[in-house]
């Protein structure tokens, strides 16, 4: 008589699905949290790169305009480009930018 009781309770156990979602969520939560953190870090890096690229572009354009309009020497163009780079990237650059020119 014990065999039918065991098979009956075993089939009831296999058929019972309550709590299955909780187990699934518990297993997937660390994975989803890690993926979310990675996405946030990636977005932060892309934003920082874009800000630095914008500062570099503005600095180069300002240096060229200074050189063209004022017929200045290389030193004046470099000073203008450095000032523009610092102004554009106040929050993301903690050191003086390095600007080089090609020899003529």
Image (cartoon, rainbow, N blue to C red):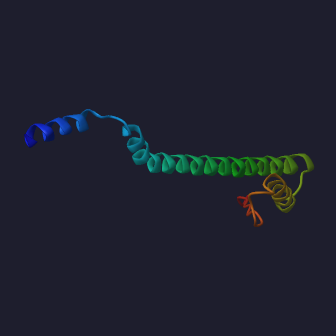
**Quadrant for the N terminus in the image:** top left
Q: Residue at x 87, y 50 (%)?
A: 66
- Position of residue 87 measured from the top left corner of the image (x, y, whole percent): 84, 54
- Position of residue 97 measured from the top left corner of the image (x, y, whole percent): 75, 62
Residue sticking out furthest to the front:
1
Q: How many marks?
A: 0
| 89 relative position to 26: left or right | right
Q: Residue at x 73, y 64 (%)?
A: 98
Q: Residue at x 68, y 46 (%)?
A: 50
| 86 relative position to 5: left or right | right
For residue 81, which quarter of the picture?
Answer: bottom right
| 66 relative position to 9: left or right | right
Residue sticking out furthest to the top:
15
**Quadrant for the C terminus in the image:** bottom right
- Position of residue 28 measured from the top left corner of the image (x, y, whole percent): 42, 45
For residue 103, which quarter of the picture?
Answer: bottom right
Front one among 47 and 103: 47
- Position of residue 33 measured from the top left corner of the image (x, y, whole percent): 51, 49
Q: Residue at x 78, y 66 (%)?
A: 96
């Amino acid at each position: 008589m014990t065999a039918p009781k065991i098979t009956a309770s075993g089939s009831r156990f296999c058929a019972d699905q309550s709590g299955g979602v909780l187990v699934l969520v518990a297993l997937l939560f660390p994975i989803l949290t890690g993926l979310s953190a990675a996405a946030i870090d990636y977005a932060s890096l892309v934003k920082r790169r874009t800000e630095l690229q914008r500062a570099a572009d503005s600095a180069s354009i300002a240096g060229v305009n200074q050189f063209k309009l004022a017929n200045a020497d290389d030193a004046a163009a470099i000073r203008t480009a450095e000032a523009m780079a610092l102004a554009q990237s106040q929050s993301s650059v903690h050191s003086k930018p390095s600007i080089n020119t090609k020899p003529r």
